[in-house]
Amino acid sequence: DWSSDVCSSDLGAAAGFARIAVEDDGPGVSEEAAGKLFVPFYSTKDTGTGLGLALVAKIALLHGGAVTVERSPELSGARFVLTLPVAA
C-alpha cells in the first residue's frame, strides 16, 4: 500500500479474490469514455492505440477476473480496480 498527494493504491482480498486498486486526483473518466475504455482500439489520447486497457481486461477475464473503472472516492480522479481469483 502506498500513496502520495496525487495517487494511491491498495491491495485487498475478499471472497476468494485479490483486488488491486490504483487511483489518482486527475480529471477522472467520463461516463461515455468509461463504457468504451476496455474496447479494443478505443483511446482518449491522440497517440494512443487503444490496446492497453483492452489487453488488461482480456487477460483478467481469461484468468476469471475483471477490471473496472470508477470515480475515486478519496482523490476524485479515476480509480481502476483489477480483481483476480486467489489460487486455492
Image (cartoon, rainbow, N blue to C red):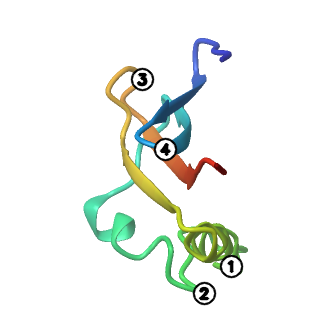
Residue at 38%, 33% (x, y): give it: 72
Q: Which circle's residue, 4 or 1, is located before the other in the chain? A: 4
The reply to whether dot 2 and dot 1 touch (C-beta < 8 Å) is: yes
Question: Relative to residue 58, is residue 45 depicted above or below?
Answer: above
Crowding at dot 3, Cα within 10 Å, few <14 / some 14-19 / many 20+, comes out as some
Residue at 62%, 76% (x, y): give it: 62
Return the residue at label 1: 51
Q: CA distance from mark 3 to mark 4?
A: 27 Å
Return the residue at label 2: 41
Q: Amino acid at mark 1?
A: Leu
Return the residue at label 3: 75
Mark 2: secondary structure:
loop
Return the residue at label 4: 16
Q: Which circle's residue, 1 or 3, is located before the other in the chain? A: 1
Crowding at dot 2, Cα within 10 Å, few <14 / some 14-19 / many 20+, comes out as some
Q: Which circle's residue, 2 or 1, is located before the other in the chain? A: 2
Question: Relative to residue 30, is residue 86 depicted above or below?
Answer: above
Front tag of 4 and 1: 4
- Disc assigned to residue 77: none
Q: Which circle's residue, 2 or 4, is located before the other in the chain? A: 4
Residue 6 x %, y %: 58, 21
Q: CA distance from mark 2 to mark 4?
A: 32 Å
Question: Relative to residue 82, is residue 38 depicted above or below?
Answer: below
